Image: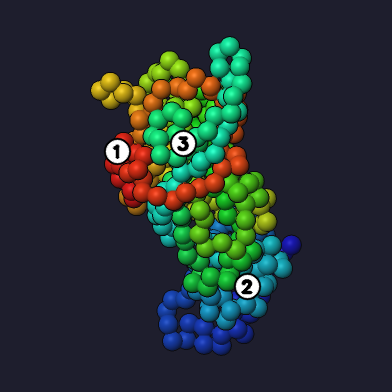
Amino acid sequence: MAFDLNRFMALVKTCNPNFKRFATTSHLDPVIAELKGKTFISPQNREKLEKLIAFIPFDRQTTYAKALDYLTQNGGVQVGAIPTKPVMKFTQFAYLIGQYDGVNRHGEKKKIPLIPDTVGSPGPRSFVHTHVLSWSSSNGHNASLQTVRTREWVKFDKDTQAEPFNAIQDPDREFFHPGILGSTGALSGTDDHSTKLPALICCNPRKPGVLKAQQWYQYSVDGGTKWHNIEGAAFEIEKRVKQEGNDWVYIFKKTNWAQHNNKHFHFEVMYTVGAAPEYMPRKDTDVEKMGFAVPCEMTKFARKVVATG
């Protein structure tokens, strides 16, 4: 589709007859600068224009709607908003209780109850650290995000079931939440960082080690075909096993990824691993399935709470 800058500018002045009569600058200036000299809008130009337009205030987008519609019709440029100014917050701790089917070294099976008031083995089936990431609409109009999809992307640096963990640890090295296509219209996303009972997921005999991950929160304006990182919504996750005195401990930590996010965030909690139970779950058993969460203070189970945000 051919693009005509003169036609675009004529529409701008039709939308606002006083364009630049009383001011030397306009919210459209970055868009006009990107369009100069172009008769065709490439995919790269389109992405840049969509981001520039996304930060034009909603009332100005409305004022120049006819001109921006011309960009859509003759360049495929979508007019709307994107998530911006992300804020991460720890909101709640809970534990899951229930039971699992265990097997001992002789192959004998037994249903193992997970006792809610016990820190070590068998203990609850998992600990849940609920975090919420909230964001704003780039154009100041929350309804503009109704068609924007968002999701969480996490990638670990190695096999999640390798030492110091075992095959009861979740096997996903890379995953998306709430799935590849994400969800639409959200102004926040809940991130339940759950960790299965350390006595179950740490390898036996216990060994020191660390598993790290990179985390981005992402958005899509085209229905989930192409994804972009929400600027500043980048975090690092660490799961570490080590000895402290005579005990083995498990540490879960989440911090801002300094390379991409300079807003300080630090969540860190330590649990005593405890002895491996006689009856262990089978490989890849989802011990969190069919459980129910009980909110409480983290100090009920944590050996040490280092930071909460």
Crowd tier of the residue under label 1, counting other residues whose Cα lies within 10 Å: few below 14, some 14–19, many 20 or above: some
**Residue identifier under label 2:** 68
* Residue 205 against residue 147 in the figure, above or below: above
Viewer-side residue, 13 vs 146: 146
Q: Earlier in the sequence, mark 1 or mark 2?
A: 2
Pick out the residue farthest to the right: 1
* Residue 194 against residue 38 in the figure, above or below: above
Q: What is the secondary structure assignment of the residue under circle 2?
A: helix
Q: Which numbered tag is attached to residue 116? A: none
Residue 14 left/right relative to 141? right
**Residue identifier under label 1:** 304
Viewer-side residue, 147 vs 88: 88
Q: Residue at x 65, y 78 (%)?
A: 66
Q: Mark 3 against mark 1, which lies toward the viewer?
A: 3
Give how far across and how far down residue 182 sits, in percent.
62, 52
Residues at circles 1 and 2 in contact by the CB criterion of under 8 Å = no
Give how far across and how far down residue 21 sits, in percent.
47, 86
Disc 1 marks a residue whose amino acid type is Lys
Residues at circles 3 and 1 in contact by the CB criterion of under 8 Å = no
